[in-house]
Amino acid sequence: MRRFLLTAVLAFALSMIAKFIVDTYVHVPVHIIGTFAGLYPTHNPGVAFGVTLPPILQELLILIALFFVCMLAWKTRGTILSQIGYGLIVGGALANIVDRIPDGLVTDFVQIGNFAIFNIADSCITIGAVFLLAEAFGLVRNR
C-alpha cells in the first residue's frame, strides 16, 4: 500500500507543479519540436477529450469514479505494477479535481500533433490505466 500512496502523492505533486509553472510562465504557445509538439496553454471546462457535462453531474461522476478506483486499489493491494497504476490514476485525478476547484477549469498544456491538448495529470491517469490493462491481459509478470 505504501507504493500506491507514494505514487499518488508524486503524481499529484508533479501535476500541480507543472500546472503552476505553466499558469505562471507560459502565456503563449511554445514550440518544442516545430509545430508538432510543444506547450499550448488552454483551459478546459470539460472532462476527457473536452467532453462537457452539466457541472454538478460532471463533478459527481468524477468523485464516484475516484471512489471506485480507491476501493479497487484498496481491495487488490496486489502487485507493484497495480499499486503504481492505481496510484497514478488517483494522484492524477486528484490533481485535476484540485485544479478545477477555483474556476471550474482544468489547465491543459501539452500539445502533440493534432491530438487533444492534455496535462501531466491526464498523462498519469492514462499511464496508470495502461499499467492495469497490461497486468490484466497478462502482458507483464505478476509479482
Image (cartoon, rainbow, N blue to C red):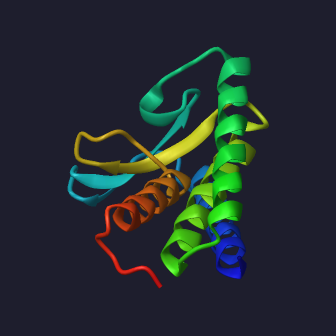
Is 52 or 136 nearer to us in this picture? 136
Residue 88 image-quadrant placement:
bottom right
Question: Could you tell me which residue is drawn at 39 percent across and 67 percent down?
Answer: 135
Image quarter hosting the N terminus: bottom right
In percent of width and height, residue 118 lies at 44, 46
In percent of width and height, residue 21 lies at 61, 61
Q: How many numbered marks are there? A: 0
Q: Is residue 55 above or below residue 87?
A: above
Residue lying farthest to the bottom in this orientation: 143
In percent of width and height, residue 131 lies at 42, 65
> Does residue 95 show up?
no
Residue 142 falls left or right of residue 35:
right
Is 82 or 20 nearer to us in this picture? 82
Question: Could you tell me which residue is drawn at 21 percent across and 51 percent down?
Answer: 36
Question: Could you tell me which residue is drawn at 32 percent across and 69 percent down?
Answer: 138
In percent of width and height, residue 75 lies at 68, 62
Residue 43 falls left or right of residue 133:
right
Is 91 or 102 nearer to us in this picture? 91
